[in-house]
Protein backbone atom coordinates (compact mmCIF):
# COMPACT_ATOMS: atom_id res chain seq x y z
CA UNK A 1 0.00 0.00 0.00
CA UNK A 2 1.25 3.47 -0.85
CA UNK A 3 2.48 5.47 2.13
CA UNK A 4 1.01 8.96 2.49
CA UNK A 5 1.56 11.33 5.41
CA UNK A 6 -1.87 11.73 7.02
CA UNK A 7 -2.86 15.29 7.83
CA UNK A 8 -6.58 14.72 8.16
CA UNK A 9 -9.20 12.09 8.84
CA UNK A 10 -10.37 12.56 5.24
CA UNK A 11 -6.97 11.46 3.90
CA UNK A 12 -7.13 8.35 6.10
CA UNK A 13 -10.54 7.55 4.67
CA UNK A 14 -9.21 7.97 1.13
CA UNK A 15 -6.52 5.38 1.91
CA UNK A 16 -9.18 3.07 3.34
CA UNK A 17 -11.26 3.57 0.19
CA UNK A 18 -8.20 2.75 -1.93
CA UNK A 19 -7.69 -0.46 0.09
CA UNK A 20 -11.33 -1.51 -0.34
CA UNK A 21 -11.20 -0.84 -4.09
CA UNK A 22 -7.86 -2.60 -4.53
CA UNK A 23 -9.19 -5.77 -2.91
CA UNK A 24 -12.70 -5.81 -4.37
CA UNK A 25 -13.65 -9.09 -6.01
CA UNK A 26 -15.17 -9.01 -9.45
CA UNK A 27 -18.28 -10.78 -10.73
CA UNK A 28 -20.23 -11.32 -13.91
CA UNK A 29 -21.52 -8.00 -15.24
CA UNK A 30 -23.15 -6.42 -18.26
CA UNK A 31 -20.22 -4.30 -19.45
CA UNK A 32 -16.58 -3.50 -18.79
CA UNK A 33 -15.82 0.25 -18.88
CA UNK A 34 -12.32 1.07 -20.17
CA UNK A 35 -11.69 4.67 -19.14
CA UNK A 36 -9.28 6.48 -21.44
CA UNK A 37 -5.94 7.37 -19.87
CA UNK A 38 -2.37 6.07 -19.35
CA UNK A 39 -2.27 4.82 -22.94
CA UNK A 40 -2.40 0.98 -22.90
CA UNK A 41 -1.69 0.48 -19.18
CA UNK A 42 -5.33 -0.43 -18.48
CA UNK A 43 -5.81 -2.57 -21.58
CA UNK A 44 -4.56 -5.89 -20.20
CA UNK A 45 -6.94 -5.66 -17.26
CA UNK A 46 -9.87 -4.99 -19.60
CA UNK A 47 -8.91 -7.88 -21.88
CA UNK A 48 -8.39 -10.26 -18.95
CA UNK A 49 -11.84 -9.50 -17.55
CA UNK A 50 -13.43 -9.99 -20.97
CA UNK A 51 -11.60 -13.26 -21.66
CA UNK A 52 -12.88 -14.56 -18.31
CA UNK A 53 -16.39 -13.92 -19.69
CA UNK A 54 -17.22 -11.48 -16.91
CA UNK A 55 -19.07 -9.30 -19.45
CA UNK A 56 -19.90 -9.47 -23.16
CA UNK A 57 -19.55 -5.74 -23.88
CA UNK A 58 -16.61 -3.33 -23.56
CA UNK A 59 -17.25 0.42 -23.44
CA UNK A 60 -14.31 2.66 -24.31
CA UNK A 61 -14.98 6.06 -22.75
CA UNK A 62 -13.24 9.37 -23.33
CA UNK A 63 -12.72 11.83 -26.18
CA UNK A 64 -10.46 11.89 -29.22
CA UNK A 65 -9.92 15.64 -28.82
CA UNK A 66 -7.93 14.92 -25.65
CA UNK A 67 -5.08 13.77 -27.88
CA UNK A 68 -5.49 16.71 -30.29
CA UNK A 69 -6.55 20.31 -29.74
CA UNK A 70 -7.43 19.76 -26.07
CA UNK A 71 -4.38 17.68 -25.16
CA UNK A 72 -3.38 18.20 -21.54
CA UNK A 73 0.16 19.28 -20.78
CA UNK A 74 0.97 16.31 -18.54
CA UNK A 75 -0.78 13.60 -20.60
CA UNK A 76 -0.03 11.85 -23.87
CA UNK A 77 -2.99 9.54 -24.41
CA UNK A 78 -4.01 7.24 -27.22
CA UNK A 79 -7.23 7.84 -29.16
CA UNK A 80 -10.44 5.89 -28.72
CA UNK A 81 -9.86 4.51 -32.22
CA UNK A 82 -6.48 3.12 -31.13
CA UNK A 83 -8.12 1.56 -28.07
CA UNK A 84 -10.70 -0.11 -30.31
CA UNK A 85 -8.03 -1.33 -32.77
CA UNK A 86 -6.06 -2.84 -29.86
CA UNK A 87 -9.13 -4.79 -28.74
CA UNK A 88 -9.98 -5.99 -32.26
CA UNK A 89 -6.43 -7.25 -32.83
CA UNK A 90 -6.98 -9.48 -29.80
CA UNK A 91 -10.18 -11.00 -31.03
CA UNK A 92 -12.84 -8.65 -29.69
CA UNK A 93 -15.59 -8.18 -32.28
CA UNK A 94 -17.04 -4.84 -33.38
CA UNK A 95 -20.46 -5.70 -31.95
CA UNK A 96 -18.87 -6.33 -28.57
CA UNK A 97 -17.42 -2.80 -28.38
CA UNK A 98 -19.30 0.43 -27.62
CA UNK A 99 -17.61 3.82 -28.08
CA UNK A 100 -18.58 6.60 -25.68
CA UNK A 101 -16.66 9.49 -27.19
CA UNK A 102 -18.18 12.66 -25.68
CA UNK A 103 -16.44 12.81 -22.30
CA UNK A 104 -13.64 15.26 -21.51
CA UNK A 105 -13.30 14.40 -17.82
CA UNK A 106 -14.30 11.88 -15.15
CA UNK A 107 -17.58 13.62 -14.31
CA UNK A 108 -18.67 13.52 -17.96
CA UNK A 109 -17.64 9.87 -18.22
CA UNK A 110 -19.86 9.06 -15.25
CA UNK A 111 -22.83 10.92 -16.77
CA UNK A 112 -22.48 9.46 -20.25
CA UNK A 113 -21.65 5.89 -19.23
CA UNK A 114 -24.45 5.70 -16.66
CA UNK A 115 -26.92 7.18 -19.14
CA UNK A 116 -25.92 4.35 -21.46
CA UNK A 117 -26.32 1.86 -18.60
CA UNK A 118 -29.87 3.10 -18.02
CA UNK A 119 -30.74 2.92 -21.72
CA UNK A 120 -29.33 -0.61 -22.00
CA UNK A 121 -30.93 -1.66 -18.69
CA UNK A 122 -27.57 -2.83 -17.40
CA UNK A 123 -27.56 -3.98 -13.77
CA UNK A 124 -23.81 -4.17 -13.22
CA UNK A 125 -20.79 -2.48 -14.77
CA UNK A 126 -17.08 -2.98 -14.12
CA UNK A 127 -15.00 0.20 -13.93
CA UNK A 128 -11.38 -0.03 -15.11
CA UNK A 129 -9.05 2.90 -14.48
CA UNK A 130 -5.54 2.95 -13.01
CA UNK A 131 -5.43 2.22 -9.29
CA UNK A 132 -4.23 5.71 -8.32
CA UNK A 133 -7.24 7.21 -10.18
CA UNK A 134 -9.88 4.61 -9.27
CA UNK A 135 -11.04 6.13 -5.93
CA UNK A 136 -12.11 9.38 -7.61
CA UNK A 137 -13.65 7.41 -10.50
CA UNK A 138 -15.74 5.41 -8.05
CA UNK A 139 -16.75 8.47 -6.01
CA UNK A 140 -17.81 10.25 -9.20
CA UNK A 141 -19.78 7.35 -10.65
CA UNK A 142 -21.39 6.65 -7.27
CA UNK A 143 -22.57 10.27 -7.01
CA UNK A 144 -23.99 10.22 -10.54
CA UNK A 145 -25.70 6.85 -10.01
CA UNK A 146 -27.53 8.28 -7.03
CA UNK A 147 -28.40 11.48 -8.91
CA UNK A 148 -30.10 9.63 -11.77
CA UNK A 149 -31.43 6.87 -9.50
CA UNK A 150 -29.62 4.09 -11.35
CA UNK A 151 -30.18 0.97 -9.26
CA UNK A 152 -27.32 -1.07 -10.67
CA UNK A 153 -24.02 -2.02 -9.07
CA UNK A 154 -20.60 -0.46 -9.63
CA UNK A 155 -17.70 -2.89 -9.49
CA UNK A 156 -14.10 -1.67 -9.23
CA UNK A 157 -11.37 -3.57 -11.07
CA UNK A 158 -8.45 -1.14 -11.40
CA UNK A 159 -5.29 -1.76 -13.37
CA UNK A 160 -2.57 -2.05 -10.73
CA UNK A 161 0.67 -0.28 -11.57
CA UNK A 162 3.72 -0.12 -9.28
CA UNK A 163 3.53 3.04 -7.16
CA UNK A 164 7.04 4.12 -8.13
CA UNK A 165 6.44 3.64 -11.85
CA UNK A 166 5.49 6.49 -14.19
CA UNK A 167 2.33 5.48 -16.08
CA UNK A 168 2.51 5.52 -19.86
CA UNK A 169 2.15 9.01 -21.31
CA UNK A 170 2.54 10.71 -17.94
CA UNK A 171 5.34 12.64 -16.20
CA UNK A 172 4.83 11.71 -12.53
CA UNK A 173 4.90 8.39 -10.71
CA UNK A 174 1.68 6.68 -9.60
CA UNK A 175 2.43 7.84 -6.06
CA UNK A 176 2.73 11.46 -7.20
CA UNK A 177 -0.45 11.16 -9.26
CA UNK A 178 -2.31 9.65 -6.30
CA UNK A 179 -1.35 12.65 -4.17
CA UNK A 180 -2.78 14.84 -6.95
CA UNK A 181 -5.94 12.72 -6.88
CA UNK A 182 -6.35 13.39 -3.17
CA UNK A 183 -6.26 17.11 -3.93
CA UNK A 184 -8.80 16.66 -6.74
CA UNK A 185 -11.13 14.73 -4.43
CA UNK A 186 -10.99 17.68 -2.06
CA UNK A 187 -11.45 20.17 -4.93
CA UNK A 188 -14.28 18.56 -6.92
CA UNK A 189 -16.77 18.19 -4.10
CA UNK A 190 -19.77 18.93 -6.33
CA UNK A 191 -18.93 16.00 -8.62
CA UNK A 192 -18.29 13.26 -6.06
CA UNK A 193 -20.05 11.46 -3.26
CA UNK A 194 -18.68 11.64 0.27
CA UNK A 195 -16.00 9.12 1.13
CA UNK A 196 -18.07 7.99 4.11
CA UNK A 197 -21.02 7.14 1.82
CA UNK A 198 -18.78 5.26 -0.59
CA UNK A 199 -17.14 3.23 2.18
CA UNK A 200 -20.54 2.36 3.64
CA UNK A 201 -21.70 1.21 0.20
CA UNK A 202 -18.65 -1.02 -0.30
CA UNK A 203 -18.83 -2.53 3.18
CA UNK A 204 -22.59 -3.13 3.18
CA UNK A 205 -22.88 -4.42 -0.35
CA UNK A 206 -19.70 -6.46 -0.65
CA UNK A 207 -21.27 -9.87 -0.10
CA UNK A 208 -24.68 -8.99 -1.56
CA UNK A 209 -23.08 -7.85 -4.80
CA UNK A 210 -20.84 -10.90 -4.91
CA UNK A 211 -23.80 -13.25 -4.72
CA UNK A 212 -26.12 -11.50 -7.18
CA UNK A 213 -27.16 -13.53 -10.23
Image (cartoon, grey):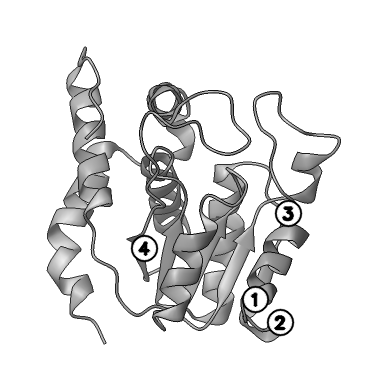
Instruction: Kindly identify the residue that appears in the image at 45 percent across and 54 percent down.
Output: 147
Q: Find the distance from the CA under tag 1 to the CA under tag 4.
A: 19 Å
Q: Earlier in the sequence, mark 4 or mark 3?
A: 3
Which quadrant of the figure has residue 34?
bottom right
- The residue mark sitting in front, 2 or 4, is 2
Instruction: Kindly identify the residue that appears in the image at 58 percent across and 24 percent down.
Output: 171
Residue 2 is left or right of residue 180, and the answer is: left
Residues packed near mark 2 inside 10 Å, few (<14), some (14 to 19) or many (20 plus): few
Instruction: Kindly identify the residue that appears in the image at 34 percent across and 63 percent down.
Output: 155
Residue 162 is left or right of residue 44, and the answer is: left
Rendered location of residue 130, percent (x, y): 45, 46
Is residue 30 something one can see in this rendering? no
Is residue 190 something one can see in this rendering? yes
Mark number for residue 154? Answer: 4
Mark number for residue 94? Answer: 2
Rendered location of residue 27, percent (x, y): 30, 75
Amino acid sequence: MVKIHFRSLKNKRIIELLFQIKNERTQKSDAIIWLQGDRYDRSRKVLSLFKKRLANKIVVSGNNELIGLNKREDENNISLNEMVRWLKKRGIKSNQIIIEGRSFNTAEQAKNVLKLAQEKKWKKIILVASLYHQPRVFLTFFKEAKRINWKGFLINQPAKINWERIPSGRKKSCKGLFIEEIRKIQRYQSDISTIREALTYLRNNKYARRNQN
